[in-house]
Image: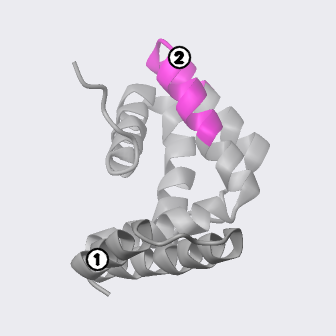
Amino acid sequence: MSVELIQDRLTRLRNRKLSDEEIVEESIELAKELVRAARQGMTIGERREAGRLRKLVRDPIGKLFAVSMADRIFRSGSARKKASQFRHLLHQFGMPDYAGMTDRWMLRAGRIASIFVPWIVMSAVLNKMRSQSRRVVLRERR
């Protein structure tokens, strides 16, 4: 069902008196149609991103790791401190299940390299985190 058909359906529903049960049923059906319409318009990149987010949402330890990374890494001052936090979080949570093979390899390599060149590794980690959150996190409007 296209967006136009969904809008037409909503217009028809506004003009009807619905029971609570009918409201629930119509809401569920409309939600399904909205999801279908959204999926039809997704690019390959958006589908890939949705799959990655689906894996993240289903990985409770991975969610803790991701939130802790965002919380601790963005707040820490120096690259050495950020690198130390990065290694600590990897030790505490282990490799997140949601991470793909390439990301797991980069996390392992980054854990070791961050001991010797923390400014390079943490710059790459921060860039990756920003890149991955770009479509999910809304920027502040000024």
Colour style of the rendered protein structure: one colour
Q: Quadrant of the C terminus?
A: top left
Q: Which residues are magenta?
A: 67-84
State which mark lies toward you, 1 or 2: 1
In the depicted view, which residue is nearer to us: 33 or 71? 33
Task: Report if residue 48 lies within the magenta region.
Answer: no
Question: Looking at the image, which residue is at 53% across and 81% down?
Answer: 29
Pointers 1 and 2 in contact (C-beta within 8 Å)? no
Three-letter residue code for mark 2: Ser
Which of the 4 quarters of the picture holds residue 47? bottom left
Residue 138: image tag: none
Question: Looking at the image, which residue is at 61% across and 39% down?
Answer: 67
Graded by Cα atoms within 10 Å as few (under 14), some (14 to 19) or many (20 or more), the crowding at tag 2 reads some
Compared to 122, does 76 lie above or below?
above
Residue 78, x across and y down, in percent: 46, 14
Cα separation between marks 1 and 2: 51 Å
Question: Which residue position is annotated with label 1?
Answer: 8
Q: Quadrant of the N terminus?
A: bottom left
Q: How many marks?
A: 2
Residue 76: image tag: 2
Three-letter residue code for mark 1: Asp
Which residue of the protein is positioned furthest toward the top in this rendering? 77
Mark 1 or mark 2, which has the lower sequence index?
1
In the depicted view, which residue is nearer to us: 101 or 74? 74
Residue 102, x across and y down, in percent: 45, 67
Compared to 122, does 103 lie above or below?
below
